[in-house]
Amino acid sequence: MKLLEVFPLDIALVQLFYIIVLYRTILNGIKVMRLETKGGFYITQIKQLQDRIFEHYLLEHNIEISGGQGRILFILWKSDHLTISEISEKTSLAKNTVSVVINGMVKKGIVERNINPNNRRQVLVSLTGYAKSLQETYEKVSQQMNQLFYQGFSQEEQRQFERYLARILKTLIDTLHTNERGGKYQ
């Protein structure tokens, strides 16, 4: 399965950025011979430029949503009616960040909060009709962004690049989960 089939490009880049930051933090605590690399710097630059271009493309289609809102919408389009914790886990955004972004989305009429009828202590975040109407255009813009991102790459280079990203992502997610159980990174 390709990484971009699981996560759209912007989610993959954000997660990779956070993972590289975590990786660097881990390496700082370990005495190892360091190889000077620029991967984290490039990923940060790519993410910043990609966000600006993607936002411009969305505005061309009269869609005004931030990167964080887009990540949450993507997850809700795949599986509507999720808790803040579930959204946090699927987007790799912190719960407090998800809450703040959701507040803005509620004010804009993109999502709504409802009490879970099966568990009254839980609040579910659900798409509004307006959010559902954005999906097709958003996906077209995402595809346009992916074409731009991979411009000049052969199919094999794309596959290889995604395999590298997936390996880094898996390693760092595993590390994060292991260390969360040990009380680190909370």
Image: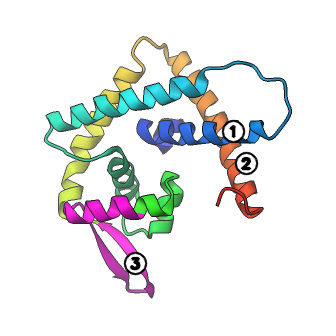
Q: Which of marks 1 and 3 is in front?
A: 1
Residue type, mark 2 in image: Thr
Q: Residue 175 carries which label?
A: 2
Query: Which color scheme did the rendering employ for the protein?
Result: rainbow
Q: Which residue is drawn at 41% across and 54% down?
A: 75
- The answer to whether residue 32 is left or right of residue 177 is right
Residue 123, compared with residue 19, is above or below; it is below
Report how far apart the C-alphas of labels 2 and 3 lie in the structure.
Answer: 30 Å
Quarter occupied by residue 132: bottom left
Nearest the eye: 104 or 148: 104
Q: Do the residues labelled 2 and 1 touch (CB within 8 Å)?
A: yes
Q: Residue at x 34, y 62 (%)?
A: 102
Report how far apart the C-alphas of labels 2 and 1 lie in the structure.
Answer: 9 Å
Residue 153, compared with residue 5, is above or below; it is above
- The answer to whether residue 99 is left or right of residue 44 is left
Q: Which residue is drawn at 86% across and 33% down?
A: 31
- Which residue is the site of mark 3? 123
Q: Which segment did they paint magenta?
A: 99-126
Image location (x, y in percent) of residue 21: 62, 39
- Which residue is the site of mark 1? 23
